Image (cartoon, rainbow, N blue to C red):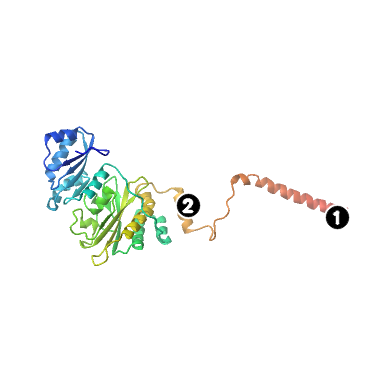
Amino acid sequence: MTSTGTQPLYRIKSVIDRVQLDAIGENEQAVLVFGPGAVARDVSAVLDLLAEKSTRCTSIVLSSRDQLADFQPLIDTDRLFYLSCGDLPERELDALIDAARMTDGRDAPADLFLPAEDLRRMATAENVADVADAVERAIASVVETRRSRCVLFEREQHVLWSPGDASEEASAAVGLVSFIVRTGMTVCLSRLAGDPRVDLDLDNPDGDSSDRFLGVPVRAARGAIVAVLVALRPEHESPFQPAEVAMLEALAAHASPYLATWLVQTPGSPFRHNALRELDQPLLAGSEPLRINAAWTRGTPWLAVATIAALLLALLFSVGIGHG
C-alpha cells in the first residue's frame, strides 16, 4: 500500500488475501492497481467483496490482450477507471494513479495565434458537432497531419464519441484516447503498433497501426477533461516534434471555452447571442463608437429644451429691436 495522495493506493498483483482485503475495506475510497496479468474474474470478485464493505474503488487494471473481452461486463457497468492490455512504464502508470486521486500539477500550454477564420467557426457554431468540426479544421492549421480528430468526452456517461465519425459511443475505460482523458497527459507516439493502451477502433478508425499519433487533452475552466485532440500522420513522414506538441496544446487551450460551452455549461446566454450577432452583422465597419457614461446624459433633454427656448427668445428680441 502507498498512503500518499488524496486516496490510499493498493497494488494487487494476483489473488487478494484476507489481510489486504480487510485493510482496503477500512477505507471509504481507495485506488486499486490490479496486475500485471490480471484476470477479469479475480478483479470482479475483489470489487464485489469491497462493495459489501462500502468501499468505493477506482480501479486500474493491467491485463493482457487475450483477456480484454472478459472485462467487458466491468466496463459496461463503469467499474473500471482504466484497462491496459499490457504492463505500463512507471511514469504512465503514475499518471493514471495521480488522475485517479484527482491530482493535477501540469503546466499551462504555450501561446498560439490562430487564423481568424478558425476562431470565427468555433465562436459561431450552432451545435457541438459544428464546434468539433471547426476544431478539427484548426488542427490542420497547427500541425501537418493526415487525419485530425476531436473526440468528445461525456463525463456523466463515461463515454467517448466523435461527431465526425459514424461509430457509436465508446467506453472511456479502454484505449489511448481514454488514457489521455483519465490522466490529462499529452501522448506522442512514433508508432501506434505495440502500445498496450491502443484500441484502433477508437484511437484510429482507419485501422492503420503504423501511424504516428499525437493526442492532447482539452480542459474546461476547472480542469475537467472535455475532449481530446488527435493528430495522425503516416509512418513514412517525420515524427511529431516538440514544437508541434506545444502548438496542439495551445490549440486545446483556445478550443476549451467553445467546447466547454456545449459539454459543460448551458448554452443560450444573451451575452453569447449578442456576441454571435455582432460577428455576423457588425454595427459599424470602422472602429467602435465613443461610449459616454449615462451620468453625463441625464440632463440632456432639459438642456435641449432650454437651448431651443433661448434661441426663440433671442430671435424675438432681435425682431423687436428691428421694428423699434
Left or right placement of residue 293 versus residue 267 in this view: right
Residue at the far bottom: name it.
236
- Give amino acid for label 1: Gly
- To which residue does mark 2 refer? 274
Task: Name above or below for residue 236 compared with residue 14.
Answer: below
Front-lying residue, 266 or 25: 25
- Quadrant in the picture for residue 25: top left
**Considering only order in the chain, which callout, 1 or 2, is on the residue closer to the N terminus?**
2
The Cα–Cα distance between marks 2 and 1, rounded to whole angstroms, is 58 Å
Quadrant of the drawing holding the N terminus: top left
10 Å crowding of disc 2: few (<14), some (14-19), many (20+): few
- Quadrant in the picture for residue 52: top left
Q: Position of residue 126 (x, y in %)?
A: 39, 55
SS at circle 1: helix
SS at circle 2: helix
Left or right placement of residue 106 versus residue 85 in this view: right
Q: Position of residue 149 (x, y in %)?
A: 30, 58
Cβ atoms at labels 2 and 1 below 8 Å apart: no
Task: Name above or below for residue 29 compared with residue 249.
Answer: above
10 Å crowding of disc 1: few (<14), some (14-19), many (20+): few
- Give amino acid for label 2: Asn
Front-lying residue, 43 or 165: 43
- To which residue does mark 1 refer? 322
